[in-house]
Amino acid sequence: MRRLILVACLLLLVSQTYAAVTVGQFIDRLATTRDVTSLKFDRNLVLTEGLMVTISTAIGINVTTQTPDKAVTEKQADTYFSAFNYQLRAKPGTPIPPPNPPPPGRGRGRHHRSPSDPDDAEED
């Protein structure tokens, strides 16, 4: 009996991770951060990567795919919202900062060599 419950739980977990997302579910998540009233799609369709690209482009996020007919899973949708969190929350047209800005005070000043640097040694 315990094995059956364990297998059922694992199947439920796997099915949720790989379950296809509908266009309506995707747009509902977008609606928490963006105005999506202008998006007119059949909300009952299974969301494909191609539809995700079309919807993303419509709200100002540029993405591409090499498999436009592939259904988007819940895990992929979660990854999308994590990866584009900043762009989704920013006002449209806001410049995106670099992912890892350099620490302050490094990289643009004059390089100071150590006195023990062989290039600074006096030649005889």
Image: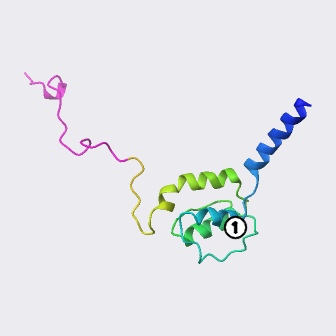
Can you see residue 68? no
Q: Main secondary structure of the magenta part?
A: loop
Q: Quadrant of residue 65?
A: bottom right
Residue 117 vs residue 4: left or right? left
Residue that appears at 80% across and 39% down: 10
Q: Above or below — where is 6 with respect to 105?
A: above
- The image shows residue 78 at horizontal and vertical percentages of 63, 52
Between residue 122 and residue 97, name the one nearer to us.
97
The answer to which image quadrant residue 72 occupies is bottom right
At 53% from the left and 63% from the top, the residue drawn is 33
- Report if residue 106 is visible in the image: yes
- Quadrant of the image occupied by residue 57: bottom right
Relative to 35, does residue 103 appear above or below in the rendering? above
Relative image position of residue 106 (x, y in whole percent): 26, 41
Q: From the viewer's perspective, is residue 24 above or below residue 3?
A: below
> From the image, which quarter does the N terminus lie in?
top right
The answer to whether 57 appears left or right of 68 in the picture is left
- In the rendered image, residue 68, in percent from the top left (x then y), is placed at 68, 63
Give the residue drawn at x 68%, y 75%: 41
Q: Please tell me which residue is depicted at 79% across the width and 48% down the height of the picture.
A: 15
| Residue at which label 1 appears | 24
Q: Position of residue 84 (x, y in %)?
A: 53, 57
**111 and 61: which is toward the camera:** 61
Q: Residue furthest right?
A: 1
> How did the renderer colour the structure?
rainbow
Q: Number of numbered discs present?
A: 1
Could you tell me the amino acid type at mark 1? Gly
Extent of the magenta region:
101-124
Q: Residues within 10 Å of mark 1 (few under 14, many from 20)?
A: some
Location of the C terminus by quadrant is top left
> Is 103 on the left or on the right of 16, as rendered?
left
